[in-house]
Structure formats: C-alpha cells, structure tokens
Image (spheres, rainbow, N blue to C red):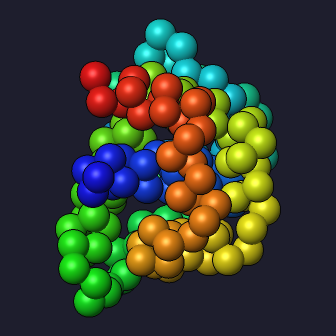
Amino acid sequence: MKPLFACLVAALGLVLAAGASGSPIIKLKDGSQIQGDIQSIQDGQYTVVSPSLGTVHVAQSNIVQISYDGGGESRDRAETDAAGIDHVSSQAQQLQAQLAQDPEAMKSILSLQNDPQIQALLNDPQIMQAIQRGDYPSLLNNPKIQALDNNPQLKSVLRELEQ
C-alpha cells in the first residue's frame, strides 16, 4: 500500500502543483530558466508557452530540471512523527523528480488535470494547503484522496508509471 501511495502522492502532487501554479520553471543546461505552461511533449520536444518569450520549443536533452512553485521547498521541510510517513514523503519526492524528467510520464500525469475528481481536489483549499505543506498524514486521511483509489483514469496512469 505504501509504495502505491507514494506513487499516487507523487503523481497527484505533480498534477496539483501544475494546476495550482500553472507554470513550471524549466531549468536548462546552459543555466537559463523558462517559466511557462507546458502545452505538449512530443518526440522529445517540449512546447512551452511563456508570458515573456511566447511559444518556445525545448529539447528534452537540454532540460536539467522541471519544478513547480510551492512544490519542492515546502515538501522538503515536511516532517512528521507518524510511522512510515517520512519514508512515503521521501519516496514521493524522489518519484516526483523522476516523473518530471520523463516526457511520457508528464504527459500522462498532466492528462489527469481534466478528470472531474482531480478538478475537485484542485478546488479544495484544504487539500491544496496539505500538498503545499507536504502534510502526508492529512492527505492519507482525506476522504477525497482515499476515493481516488477507485478512479479508473488515475489507475491507468499509475499502471503506466509502474512499467
């Protein structure tokens, strides 16, 4: 259950972070950064719409990191005494870093933003705050999060990610 939950939290964290901030920061090998909405990922090319640069095409090989505002730092600071939650938190953070670098995984994860159940989570201030704080015990006990266990689209994405 915990490895599956870590995968769920990682995927959900990316979806919620993407929905919350809308604009990831893409760090490139040359040290520059692009902030904008990832519109598509195809054949190793990211199409990003940036407010300052317009539409930009970036090769996956030039990307060092993709991060979302409100994601990494607050989750890194998350601490808890609940048994096993620190391990799940660590697993989720590692999975998020790996998933953010995989164009196919990101495409699958971003497709979840259109799911009505995910939309309900995006619009729930308590869930958004728990994601931003990295409050995994609260997320584990939230009925809306628990209901995701029966979400067919999420199950499909998780199956893809496990392969």
Taking the spot 45% from the left edge, 22% from the top edge, the residue there is 104
Does residue 30 show up?
A: no
Question: Which sits in the foreground, 157 or 96?
Answer: 157
Q: For this view, does 69 lie left or right of residue 92?
A: right
Q: From the image, which quarter does the C terminus lie in?
A: top left
- The residue furthest bottom is 81
Q: Which of 50 and 134 is in front in this view?
A: 134
Q: Position of residue 105 (x, y in %)?
A: 44, 29
Q: Quadrant of residue 90?
A: bottom left
Measuring 43% from the left and 55% from the top, which residue is drawn there?
9
Quarter of the rendering containing residue 85: bottom left
Residue drawn at x 38%, y 39% is 99
Q: Position of residue 89 (x, y in %)?
A: 31, 67
- Left or right, 1 with reference to 39: left
Above or below, 79 relative to 152: below
Q: Determine whether 77 is above or below 29 in the image.
A: below
Residue positioned 56% across, 41% down in the render: 150
Q: Can residue 39 be seen in this view?
A: yes
Q: Is residue 131 above or below residue 66?
A: below
Residue 78 x, y percent position in the rendering: 37, 81
